[in-house]
Every structure is written in structure tokens, then in C-alpha cells.
Image (cartoon, grey):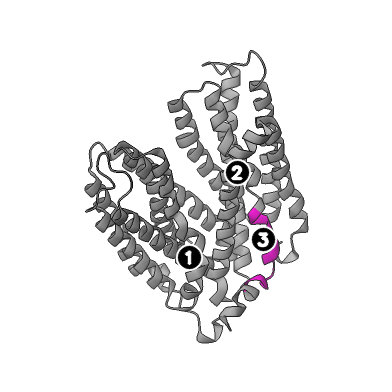
Amino acid sequence: MRGKLLPLAGLYLVQGLPYGLQSGLLPVLLRARGLSLTRVGLAKALYAPWLFKLVWAPLVDTRGSPRAWLTLSTAALGLVCGLLASHPPATAGQAGLPVTVAGLLLLLNLAAAVQDVALDMLAVRLLEPAELGPGNTVQVVAYKLGAVLAGGGLLALVPTLSWPLLFLLLAATYWLAAALTWVAPALRQLPPPLPSEHPRHTLHLGQDLLAVPGTLWTVGFVLTYKLGEQGTSALFPLLLLDCGISTPELGLWNGVGAVACSIAGSSLGGALLARRRQPLPLLKSALQFRLGGLACQTALLFHLDSPGASLAPSTVLRGAALLSLCLQHFLGGLVTTTTFTLMMCCSQLAPSALQATHYSLLATLELLGKLLMGTLAGALADSLGPRLCFFVFLALSAAPMLYLGLAPNTLA
């Protein structure tokens, strides 16, 4: 199993680099060069290719091998980074992101999204049922580590390395990963799908995907299981900031501390799944603990709103608030890893020529559900108030527990 997990870990790590680059490193560099906050925020529109993975997923499924797609897409990431090295993001006083840089960043996301489809297809076909728990732990943890390295690690090197050197370093990393992908023994084992396995007709693709056992239930679950959690994770840190916690301290706890706790939760999920624990019972327990943690966080919110409440250093309330923040990320990592394992179990029920497309459908809808609540959480808090808003999040976190009772036997 180690021969499978090590290549997957390396590939998922480099897959997390573009997200960390654009969520952590790029906004700081653009702001430091004088771009307005509005224009820095608009740069997130360059994530668009990730929402259209289903467009090229059937091509990745039915043409060529996973190893070839992974090698080409990873090498393409290196090429784009090499081109970015020769184009600074902005000069002082420039009104916006240069068109050339924006186009290259769009291509970077396109190559990363293609790599994501190919890598998920490889994982679905390569991992045995008993290996799904450790495999999905590797997926989640390595991706988060890659994002932290690109967002925080490279940001720490900014005073030492210039923009060209940073992207040449990234380019070299991608080209090394592409070469290792091509020669890795574990990745040479999977032949391309047989011609007879190809989808019958493009117009019937949606019907074929939804006909896979358990798909309709899984679609409903991945769209809703993170709604309450995403709402609280988006709002609770901001409410702590309003109550007097400093920006650097909050950044430490909600950044480094949150990622560390999330990785610990993901690792625990993988360890439990590796011990032959079934995803659905484990998911039920994890969702119950998550609901309890959110209830405690809601109680803290009510106390913070009361007269005389203080988040001064060394107070019990301050420690409880920061502990609650980390606990929710720990439980969120546990829930995420178990859910991704369940998604992969469902995709393995599809014909081999549809597995990458099927998993891309589930992953895209999972991302859509998280983005939806992350976007609307602030508006809900402004319109309903924090207290009522957190009651809504509690209800949204309880709903998936009830929904688990409707799970089909094919996923048990």
C-alpha cells in the first residue's frame, strides 16, 4: 500500500500549491504593490476552471492513461509558472492585474483542475476498498500541506526571493513532480479503459452518472453536509475579532492552529477507516460530535454578547473561544476525510470509464455547497443577527445526521 500512497501524497501536495498561491501569497503581493482591495478580491474569479471540471472529465476518463494526463498537466503547471516568472503581477500605482498575468493564472487553474480530475481517477482505480481510508487521509492532508507551503511558506520567503525566483522554484517543483509521475512504478499499473467501456452517448452522460447506485443520495449529502460548518467557520473568527482579539493572534489560531487541527482530524479519520470502520457509522458519530461542538460555540457566542464579557488575555472565556475554534476544525477534518471516502466508495460503483467523471461531479457539488454558504454567511448574519444566524447553522448541521438514515444499502 505504501507504494501507492507515496506517489499520491506527492501529487496531492503539488496540487495544493496553486490554491495556497492564490489564496495566501498572491493577495498579499498584489496588495503590497498598490492594488485596491476590490481588485485583489476580483482575482478570485480566476478559480472558475474548478467549477467546470465536468467539461473535460469525460475526455480524461476515456482518452489516454491517468499517468499520461497527470504527467502532462503537472508539466503544464511548471510551464505556466515559468512564464509567470517573467511577468510581475503589477507595478506600483497600476490600476489592476495585468491581462497577461491574469491569463496565465487562469491557465494555471485550468491545468490544476485537469490534474485534479486525472489524480482523482487514478485514486479511484488504484485504491482497494480497504485502502480508501488511508488514501483519502493522504489526499486531504497532503493537499492542505501544499496549500500551507505555497501560501505561508513562500510568503515567508518573499523578503529573500523575488517574484521571478519564487515562480522558478515552483516551476522546478512541478517539473520534478512530472518526471517522478512518469517513472513511478505504482502509476504504470493501470491500463486505459477498454473501448467497449466508453460511454454510449454524450447526451446520456448525465443519466449514466445518476444511474450509478447511491449517486442521488450522495449528491444530496455532499451539497448540504458542510453548510452549517462553513457558516460558523466564516463568521466565528470575525466575531472574535470584533470582541477584541488581535489580528495577529487570530491569524495564528485560525491559520496555523486551524490547519494543524484539521490535519489531525483527517489523520484520525484515516486511522479509524483503516481499522475496517465503515464510513457511514463513523460519519454519524463524527457529525454528532460536530453538532455538540457547534452548540458549545453558540453558547460562547451568547456569552460574548452579554454585558461584562471580556476576551482579555488569560481569561477562561478567551481560552474557551480559541479552543472551540480549533475543535471545530479538528472535527471538520474528521468529517471531510470520511465524506471523501464515502464519495470514492460511490464512484467505484460506476463503470471504469465513468469513474473520474462521476467523482468530479461529486467533488464539484461538494465545493459548490461550501462556496454557497461561505458566500452567504455574512449576509445572513447582517440580516438575522449573529444569535439567530448561529441557530440556523445548528439546524443545518443537524440535518445531515437525519439524512444519513436515508442512505442506500449499496453504500453501507
In the rendered structure, which amino acid carries the disc numbered 3?
Thr
> In the figure, is residue 65 to the left or right of 323?
left
With respect to residue 10, does 267 lie above or below? above
Q: Which residue is mark 1?
A: 117
- Segment colored magenta: 209-223
Residue 305 x %, y %:
65, 21
Residue plotted at (37% across, 40% down): 152
Q: CA distance from mark 3 to mark 2?
A: 23 Å
For residue 381, above or below residue 192: above
SS class, disc 1: helix
State the residue at coordinates (65%, 43%).
228
Q: Position of residue 118 (x, y in %)?
A: 45, 67
Quadrant of the snapshot with the C terminus: bottom right
Q: Is residue 15 left or right of residue 409?
A: left
- Mark before the other along the chain sequence, 1 or 2: 1
Residue 377 part of the magenta segment: no
Instruction: Say which of 341 and 394 sits in front.
Output: 394
How far apart marks 1 and 3 lie (CA) works out to: 19 Å
Q: Nearer the viewer, residue 169 or 379?
A: 379
> Which of the labelled discs sits on residue 27, or is there none?
none
Identify the residue position indicated by label 2 in the image: 376
Residue topped by disc 3: 218
What residue type is disc 1 on?
Val
Q: Which SS class for mark 3?
A: helix
